[in-house]
Image (tube, rainbow, N blue to C red):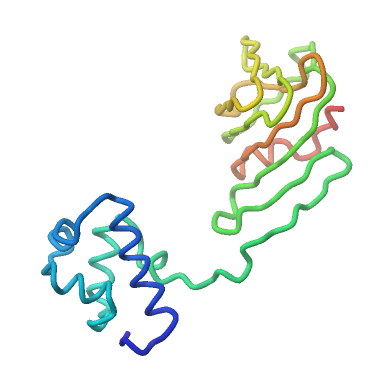
Amino acid sequence: MTQDDGELDSLVRKRIRALRVAQGWSLEELAERARLSPSSLSRIENGQRRLALDQLVTLARALDTSLDQLVEMDTQDVISNPMIDGAHGVMRWPIKADPGLTVIRQRMTNPPPDSPARMRAHPGREWLVVLSGVAVLLLGNRRLRVETNQAAEFPTMLPHAIGAAGGPCEILGIFDRDARRGHKGEPKPD
């Protein structure tokens, strides 16, 4: 890669500097970790020195990232629209960078089921935050109130169910692939 490689070259240099600054490291600290001289690192960041593949690999390791992430250019599809699942009353967004994860937004009006037989258990993990209202999370033998702006994270092998407490609530959840599969075909909570 040379200085005239354009947009990618400039982007990689900006990423190196931004990652260094985000770590709170000086030029000297990153240079030491990457086994470069501080002046060489400064010239790399400022576009005054050619970017060599071996240096990029070393810098990526020193910055605790991968070479792929350091040189990634795919920023065309930054906005995504939800897939509406009217049958279950949810909106879903797949996470492009990690196809195993899905974000789900759901409005609930009914309380959680009163029968332990209606609780689900399956492989995976779930994370959710209550956007409005109060949710009741049944988790194993526990009954937890999750209020607005509170989050819950749990392994889904624990029998679980969720519903509203005393009025509508809205949740935003992140499901891994196994947790998402465990909820396919689940009856609509409202």
Residue 72, percent across and down?
46, 70
Q: Is 97 in front, or is 150?
A: 150
Q: How many marks?
A: 0
Q: Quadrant of the N terminus?
A: bottom left
Q: Quadrant of residue 99?
A: bottom right
Q: Give the residue drawn at x 66%, y 61%.
A: 79
Q: Left or right: 115 with respect to 181? A: right
Q: Give the residue drawn at x 30%, y 56%.
A: 21
Residue 107, percent across and down?
80, 32
Q: Left or right: 38 with respect to 63? A: left
Specify the farthest residue to the bottom.
4
Residue 162, percent across and down?
72, 23
Q: Left or right: 60 with respect to 68? A: left
Q: Quadrant of residue 131?
A: top right
Residue 158, percent across and down?
60, 22
Q: Give the residue drawn at x 81%, y 24%.
A: 168
Q: Quadrant of the C terminus?
A: top right
Q: Give the residue drawn at x 75%, y 31%.
A: 170
Q: Is residue 131 above or below residue 95?
A: above
Q: Quadrant of residue 67?
A: bottom left
